[in-house]
Image (cartoon, grey):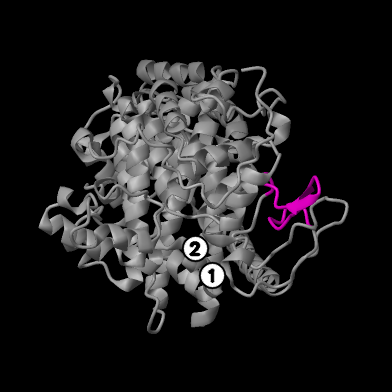
Amino acid sequence: MRNYFKALNISSAAKREEIAHALRPNSDVTHSLSEKHLSDAQEILMHDKRRQVYTNNVNFFQTLHEAKHCLATPFAVDTHQWDYRLEEFDCSEHESHANLSDVEPNSDVEIPKQL
Amino acid sequence: MVLLLLTAAAGFTSQPAISEDLFEDIGASAQIAITRICQPLQFFKSSQAYRACLLQQLKNINPSAEPFFRQLASLNAEQGTAQNTAASTSSAQTQTTAPSESNAATTTEPATLPAQPSQLEPSSTPNPNTTNDLAKLSTTVSEAIAPWLEKIPGKPLSLVLLPLALLILLLTAIALRLRRKASARKRVKIAEAKATFQLRPDPAGKPAKPNTGTATRATGTSHQESPNQPRHPHDNTETTNDTGVSTGVSTGASKGVIASAEAETVAVANTTTPSQNQVSESELAIFETSRHGFENWLSSATPQRRREMCSELFILTMAYTDNRFDPELKKRIFKTKERDANTLIKRWAFKHDSQALAYAIRVFQTDTNKDQRSQFIDLLMALLVTEKALTPVQNNFLRFLSDAFGMGREQLERQYLRAFGEQMPSMPRPDKLTWWEPIDEETLFRWDAQSVALQPTKIRYLVLLGLPLQGKLDQESMLANYRRAVGRCHRERVNQLGEFEQELLTTRRKQFELARDALMEITA
């Protein structure tokens, strides 16, 4: 799956206006997408319901990318070519992909003293 | 009564493949004697297998009886075969010591045993001594058999009681069914009532109505829904503000709706989340600062509890990634100072903590067997997937887990087919416009759990059972979908897991039952 957010250099929590700005012709970032992919990105990201579903999958694939080492164990199999599917979802250089912009994490939680 | 029925049934079905040699050995006289003793059992009188069984049972119950038969056979061999008349005499004496059922049946004997005398025609003149011996032996034999006759299944008494027992069972089943229906109607009415009227929370901070799934609880200065309290999936209009004062009926805005999309599925987990009593204070500490917080948190947990916590993380992750939660709940989870297990796991799930997910997968890889992992996939499907509404995230998640669990694509798709009666949709490609073309608005709506949660009860139930949202509701289709949904929720389907997972299915099943009952009333 293509990660349009990464290609457009925007967050998966980006608002519609920000996405539209990134998708505008002659944008600095659209050159990283083929014409076909850019067309698809516009149709998907500018459609609210589609964008929501797509964003959910992007967030989930980012989680899976970090957890995919679980597939390298003798217990596991790889019948879906996860390396290929998840290759665009490495977000290690970014902050957490979870959208916590709508919450205010409690700062005064206890630090565990005992594991 | 049931015991009697079972006994009778066992008797009817217990015609064994026992050798009849013993019966053949004892000689014609004893055969007649046995046959006459068995006279009351009209339906068995011609069964050689039954007589063999009778003798075998007699041997088992009263081993002392067998020598009499052996002696009888020996006498026959030495002094010739006994005459039919001698046998009749001995059997006549037998009647005096046999149970009353035998006496009652004596009058029918000529008609019921027409072939026996001719088959046992003697070849020599009877010896009076032998006749007397035979008579004594038959009497002794009948005495030996008499106690066992009391245990013979299919006795006339049983035959009389059998229809009566069946009738009573039938009436009981009807009564139970009626009671269950009445109870279901009552539940629907209660649910509807709750959707209309706000339950005011107990100022003392205790649940307003314990164990009803509608409890609210004060936490510090704020009044918040307790993550450990079970919550009814349809209490979606119950709202409270931060001062603990009930705000009354929701206007439908997402802010006021507590039940939310999560209620449909994730609330299931809330009902049986291990309580604080099961978790030590140290376990409840927050591990958020650690990259491996979830793993550290569970490091001292028992294997069973660790698996349960991992199960819950999977369930919540799958639900939350699809936005199956109340936005207000998410805010509260990160605002509250509660440190119970349920709150902590919700935080990890909301944060899409990949390390927590990876650890949960490792736990399942190492602490569970193949059947358990397979059953957990069934559990996820039953709890979170609704018919005609497998979301792309659910699809991907199930496929990833199936690989991580060592099952692979084929087994997953077989399990999906068994659960939903249709092929599992192929791997989603929401990045391609062509993939979106067959996706209609109704499907998008079914995927949007938060929007579904805001709909009237009927719509939510239709979605829950995967029924068409428009047009007349077909009762047969509804019942078919209901049966399939309930079939996914049989506790046996997760019998390799634990009580925790089985309770999740039971709660989920009740949601389907509620939907069925409500839709039945609509279609009635």
Residue under numbered circle 2: B450
- Tag count in the figure? 2
Dominant secondary structure (helix, strand or loop) of the stretch shown in magenta: loop
Question: Quick one: B383 or B197, which is closer to the camera?
Answer: B197
Give the left or right position of residue A13, taking residue B104 as reference: left
State left or right for residue B104 relative to residue B391. Answer: right
- What is the spatial separation of the Cα atoms under label 2 and label 1, in whole angstroms? 7 Å
Name the spot of residue A9 as percent of width and height, x first: 29, 47
Residue where numbered disc 1 is placed: B454
Residue A1 visible in this rendered orientation of the protein: yes
- Give the x, y percent position of residue B349: 50, 41
| Magenta span of residues | B209-229
Q: Which mark is residue B218?
A: none
Mark 2 neighbour density, 10 Å: few (under 14) some (14–19) many (20 or more): many
**Magenta stretch: residue B294 in it?**
no
Amino acid beneath label 1: Leu
Query: Could you tell me which residue is drawn at 49 percent across and 40 percent down?
Result: B351
Which residue appears farthest toward the left when viewing the image? A35
Q: Residue at x 30, y 20 (%)?
A: A73
Q: Could you tell me if the residues under marks 2 and 1 are in contact, i.e. CB atoms within 8 Å?
A: yes
**Position above or below: B118 against A38:** above
